[in-house]
Amino acid sequence: MDQSQKDLVRKLIKDGYSHRQIKKKTGFALASISKVRNEKEELTENIIKNGIIIENPVSETVEELLDRFKIDKTYWNVAKSTVNEWGSKKNYNRQCKAWLERKGDIIDWDNFKKEFIETVKKQSPIVSRKEYKIGKCLMEVDIFDLHLDKLAWWAETGENYDNKIARKRFFDAINYFIFVTKPFEIDEILFPYGNDFFNSDKDYPFPQTTKGTPQENDIRWQKSYKMGRQMITTAVNMLSEIAPVKMIGIPGNHDEQKTFYLGDALECTFENNKNVDVDNSPRTRKYFQYGKNLLGFTHGKDIPVSRLLSLMPNETAQFWGKTKYREWHLGHLHHDKKQTSIGTEDHNGIVIRNLKSLKAVDSYEFRKGFGGLGGAEVFIWHKERGLVGNLPYNL
């Protein structure tokens, strides 16, 4: 035993630690040994020698030894002991030793568990559950640029696309949006339609956009138009079971005329449905206010971003002062781009989003290197706190 260990044990003895506590901290054994060499060498305190705690005066019995060291007899057994004397009157020696071993598992675990549970219950505060409610919200469903009758061949572009695939993607997105928005308390739904919902506007002598750009379609225009009208009607009926639906028509560069015809058919279809309202006005830019939210919609092909930022406050004077959260939602480009115009005073800007598309890349777009992660999006708007959810449906 080195000097630092001896000093530690001496300090523990002076501080009143029992042998059990000292042994637990140091691992030393205990003994009671008395050896009087001469009158000047009287032992006045417990000393340390060879890892053993030596006491003075020496205990007469093992029981006295255990009591003096305050050994917990419910925890320790005496495995072996020695009490003897030797020497002469001039060189007298006496010792009392005890070797201790821990008893078996003396804890009543059933009772311990019961006491522990009762103690924790007493110390555990009762806290009532508070359900966090977001409040009533607007659900904005954006399925932009579906290009319903577009044709793509996987050998040219890496994936197939036709009217059947487009229809499946459309309803997969609608069903997904209905499912993921269940936690929200929806009191109104905004459903923009158009935005190149159809791939072509003219079909004689060949499929082409509104301005005449040739297109590759997979079905005749009559069948495409009828299918598109049925798809939108079915989707609106599904959404109207959740909350009233506001529809706004946004003409695209591929289907400007068909979007108007589609809107006219939708107005007739839902004329007697008080839960559905259709805005089929011919304007190419439209706005919608919900509480402190102001949303602008346009296809995004003809107007630069800088002009959109100034158009919104000029064209929505009746809404501008009542709103705080303002965004433009565009189609056409589909690269999930965000641009912000920072306000000069309150730093609340106008966010411009180019939303995703569910369509596949056709041969022309593949040659030009166009494309990106396809999908659709749903936004959740709180009347006072603005955007509280953006849940994308990714292909």
Image: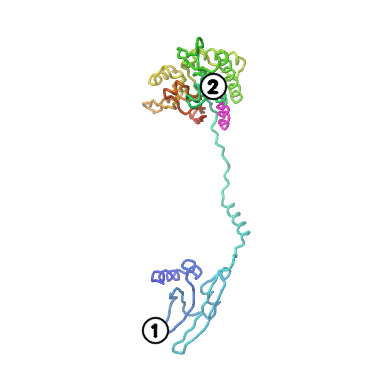
**Residue type marked 2:** Asp
**In terms of depth relative to the viewer, which is nearer, 214 or 33?**
214
Q: Image height check: is 146 above or below 98?
A: above
- Residue 352 location in percent, x, y? 43, 24
- Residue 288 location in percent, x, y? 49, 20
Q: Are marks 1 and 2 in contact (CB under 8 Å)?
A: no
**Residue type marked 1:** Lys
**In terms of depth relative to the viewer, which is nearer, 84 or 386?**
84
Q: Which residues are magenta?
A: 172-189
Q: Is residue 101 magenta?
A: no
Question: Which residue is at the far front?
Answer: 155
Give the residue drawn at x 57%, y 17%. Answer: 229
- Residue 103 location in percent, x, y? 58, 68
Q: Residues within 10 Å of mark 1 (few under 14, many from 20)?
A: few
Q: Image height check: is 393 above or below 193?
A: below
Question: Which residue is at the far bottom?
Answer: 89
**In terms of depth relative to the viewer, which is nearer, 80 or 356?**
356
Mark found first going from the N terminus, 1 or 2: 1
Horizontally, residue 124 falls left or right of residue 158, namely right
Element type at mark 2: loop
**Pointer 2: what residue?**
162
- Residue 327 location in percent, x, y? 45, 24
Distance of mark 1 from mark 2, alpha carbons?
111 Å
**Pointer 1: what residue?**
40
